Amino acid sequence: MKEIKDINQYFIKQFDEFEESLNGEKTSELHQLRKNAINYFEKLNFPTLKDEEWRYTDITSLLNHNFSSDYNKTKVSPKVISKFLFDKLEHSLLVFVNGSYSAELSKLIDIPKGVRVESIAEALKNNNSIVKKHLGSYAKNENFFFTTLSSAFIKDGAFVYVPDGIVVEDPIHIIFYTKAKDKKVLTQPRNLFVAGKNSQVTIIEHYVSDDEQVYFTNAVTEIVADEGAVVDHTKLQEESSKAFHIARMEVDQERSSNFASHLISLGAEISRNDFNARFNDEGGECMLNGLFMINNEQLFDAHTMIDHAKPYCNSYEHYKGILQDKARGVFNGKVMVRQDAQKTNAFQENNTILLSDEAIMNTKPQLEIFADDVKCSHGATIGKLNDEAKFYLKSRGIGEESATAILIHAFASDVITSIKIPALRDYLEEIITKRFNQ
Amino acid sequence: MLLEIKNLHARIAGNEILKGINLKVNAGEVHAIMGPNGSGKSTLASVLAGREEFEVTQGEIIYNDKNLLELSPEDRAREGVFLAFQYPVEIPGVSNTNLLKTAVNEIRKYRGEQELDAMEFLTLLREKSKLVELDQKFLSRSVNEGFSGGEKKRNEIFQMAVLNPTLAVLDETDSGLDIDALRIVANGVNKLKRKDNATIVVTHYQRLLNYIVPDFVHVLYQGKIAKSGGKELALELEEKGYDWIKNGKAEVVNA
Ligand SMILES: Nc1ncnc2c1ncn2[C@@H]1O[C@H](COP(=O)(O)OP(=O)(O)O)[C@@H](O)[C@H]1O
Ligand SMILES: [Mg+2]
């Protein structure tokens, strides 16, 4: 167990090793960004319950482990990865193993000209101007302990760029596979997705592992939806139940862009998802759907913030949780409607089902409205499965387990049906079935 | 004998609702249970179906030589007991098809029968939905969600047709139905009648009994069967109202 005060030094020391592993890359602009981050990191405090944004989320157990990056290219067979593919889906596939891109496991299908789907390490090596322009521009370090840590160690991740007017029909599936062997691995994927004007793209960010190891994923994803762009994003987290998963997603929305996010999470020992979207111009649409299913003593936390900075934008947010055993859930959904943002429509809802008396949910919707001509609503429910519905099912001959599973599928169904890819929907139904219907 | 209820007492939230019910039902019979609101008709139906909120404090229920009270609600259904609810619940997100498919196959598994494949199941649904003139489009809709009162009742009878019970309890399936819907529902029930099954029709009005002709009529009043008779008892009730029973009851007490 490290003391809280030692954690910064612990990673600063790792930074030296990291620099060594970089060899020739140390003189680049990018490396300056890393160095600024590690200098800033030194002054930041590890988040504790005393921080408003971490009030219900105690992550001190992270200090019990000595996590470090895996710089050896760990190899896994395609068979291992194939478990996490969606049946009958034509798609581009990017695979990362312990944080590093694996060209052998990835598969790029025909994509329209000018579209980039690659590892960000590759894009950085080629001095990609889009990456230079956007990387770190939205997920700023300021007061974000883990983002700053990520910035200091930027090395690899997924990069997708869709030029103006291009429609990418087939989804892009990005798998982050972690295999912690004797070492407690830290991976820090750093993703950047940029959709040009009137372009369209569908991206699936998929965090997986196939054993119950302790490791730490610290992911940062920046998404830019330029004017009129349509971006559909799914994040699917099915990691080791002993893993730590801390993630931040920043979405920058320009005029009349349409962004949809679906977060499906089976949790981790601790998983924390910060999600921030900002309307920079009029006419934007933002949909945030979430479904988390956690058990044992897992802790899941979603902190979302939708910033209505401009008028005529619509946001729709719906998070649903299913908690078993002694699991704990936190939902903190902030909607900010700035003075300028007249004619805003903002809807937010959080529903939680507690399947045990010992599960706990903390939910806090926060509407901050500074404009006067807006439509906003929020609501939260926390309850058990409907006993009457369950009795009805049983009275038809359906047993306890199936009845529970049916009602859980039903509870999750609107989040699942909001996902447009049938193959992904099937995959998710399967996950729910595996979880609740043995 | 298919069903024998002996001296059944049941309570909920500390109130005794059923105060010594006795009832015998043979295969092939139709029994009507009538009685004013609040007399305990739905409570009796719920106890038969196994609703846990109701606590049985005395008495027993023998069904097909088994102690029914020892069976879970799902096992009762698997043994052939069916309740058409007075107020069927809406279950958003669960389609009628999904409910019935799971139910049929769990029942078949319990009985050691092969599960139905997708084709066989669809054929069954199609055939039975005709019986209650239920539009096919209802099958893919969520259970009872947004259904009118009449549609909910028809859906109950549709489920009954698919599950093919040995003992069906219909709790005010007629209430709120217009005359056409009433005819459809009654017709469905009559067609499902066999020599080896029985139906208990709980109703508030005599009306339904013009379509489903009972062998026996029982009047439930204040948690007890106050009077039993043939189908003419229903007509008598229609004529004289329940006050007659209530008063008669008072006379018995005074005597
Ligand atoms: N869930 C319940 N909690 C408390 N009392 C109930 C409940 N259900 C029924 N009762 C009471 O039991 C009595 C009988 O109700 P019920 O069986 O529904 O009558 P009926 O179906 O004959 O109209 C009524 O007085 C009613 O208030
Ligand atoms: Mg009733």
Image (cartoon, helix red, strand yellow):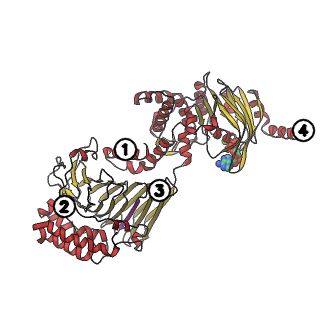
Image mark 3: chain = A
| Residue A423 picture quarter | top left
Q: Are marks 3 and 2 on the same chain?
A: yes
Q: Residue at x 47, y 41 (%)?
A: A402
Badge 2 or badge 1: first in the primary sequence: 2
Q: Position of residue A437 (x, y in %)?
A: 43, 43
The residue that disc 3 covers is: A352
The kind of residue on which mark 4 rests is Ala
Residue under pointer 4: B255
- Label 4 C-beta lies within 8 Å of the nearest ligand 1 atom: no
Identify residue for label 2: A71
Chain hosting mark 4? B
* Callouts 3 and 1 close, C-beta under 8 Å: no
Q: Amino acid at mark 1?
A: Glu
Q: Could you tell me which chain the residue with mark 2 belongs to?
A: A
Q: Chain of mark 1?
A: A
* Camera-nearest label, 4 or 1: 1
Q: Secondary structure at mark 4?
A: loop
From the viewer's perspective, is A5 left or right of A36? right
Marks 2 and 1 share the same chain:
yes
